[in-house]
Amino acid sequence: MKLSAVRLFVRELAPARAFYADLLRLRMTQGGAQLGYYAFESSGVHVVVELVAANAPAEDQVLVGRFTGISFAVSDINAEYARLSAHGVHFSGPPERQSWGGWLATFRDPSGNELQLAQYSG
């Protein structure tokens, strides 16, 4: 079994597209505003960003702006933290050493979804 895709839910597609394509540097593979989603590729895994309309049911609304459990592996977490921070990305704090030996830094996309940078060695 191989992970193929993760889904994130957003309030607005244009800022999400810019964030994932331009800031996170993920390659857009499909979708569009008229389709209500964009798909990006990250090391063989598709990150699908889907619109949740303002008039969507409450059970859909709660999918936006939460901790996702998604981590992006980086080789130099301090450099990536500095680069993204300089572009206005909101982090909950600087990278922190974890008990398992790596480093994590939690940040938010334009819809408030929490994601993480992870450095697994060093």
Image (cartoon, grey):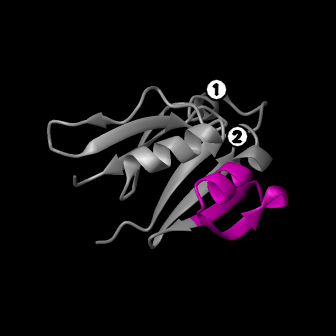
User: Residue at left 24%, top 36%?
Assistant: 97
Q: Residue furthest left?
A: 100
- Residue type, mark 1 in image: Ala
User: How far from the left and from the top, in percent, is residue 35?
Assistant: 78, 60
What range of the chain is rendered magenta? 17-40
Is residue 12 visible in this depiction of the protein?
yes
User: How far from the left and from the top, in percent, is residue 75?
Assistant: 36, 59
Taking depth in this image into account, of 90 and 27 the one nearest to the observer is 90
Q: Which residue is mark 2?
A: 52
Relative to 83, 2 lies left or right: left
Relative to 19, 108 lies left or right: left
Relative to 58, 67 lies left or right: left
Quadrant of res 76 = bottom left
Q: Which residue is mark 1?
A: 58
User: Residue at left 78%, top 30%?
Assistant: 55
Q: Residue furthest right?
A: 34
- Graded by Cα atoms within 10 Å as few (under 14), some (14 to 19) or many (20 or more), the crowding at tag 1 reads few
User: How far from the left and from the top, in percent, is residue 98?
Assistant: 21, 37
Disc number lying in front (1 or 2): 2
Q: How many marks?
A: 2
Contact (CB < 8 A) between labels 1 and 2? Answer: no
Q: Is residue 31 magenta?
A: yes
- Residue type, mark 2 in image: Val
Is residue 70 visible in this depiction of the protein?
no
- In the drawing, what numbered circle is on residue 1? none
Location of residue 119 with respect to 29 vertically, above or below? above
Mark 1 secondary-structure assignment: helix
User: How far from the left and from the top, in percent, is residue 68?
Assistant: 45, 40
User: Residue at left 82%, top 56%?
Assistant: 33
Q: Is residue 23 magenta?
A: yes
**Cα distance between the residues tagged 1 and 2:** 10 Å
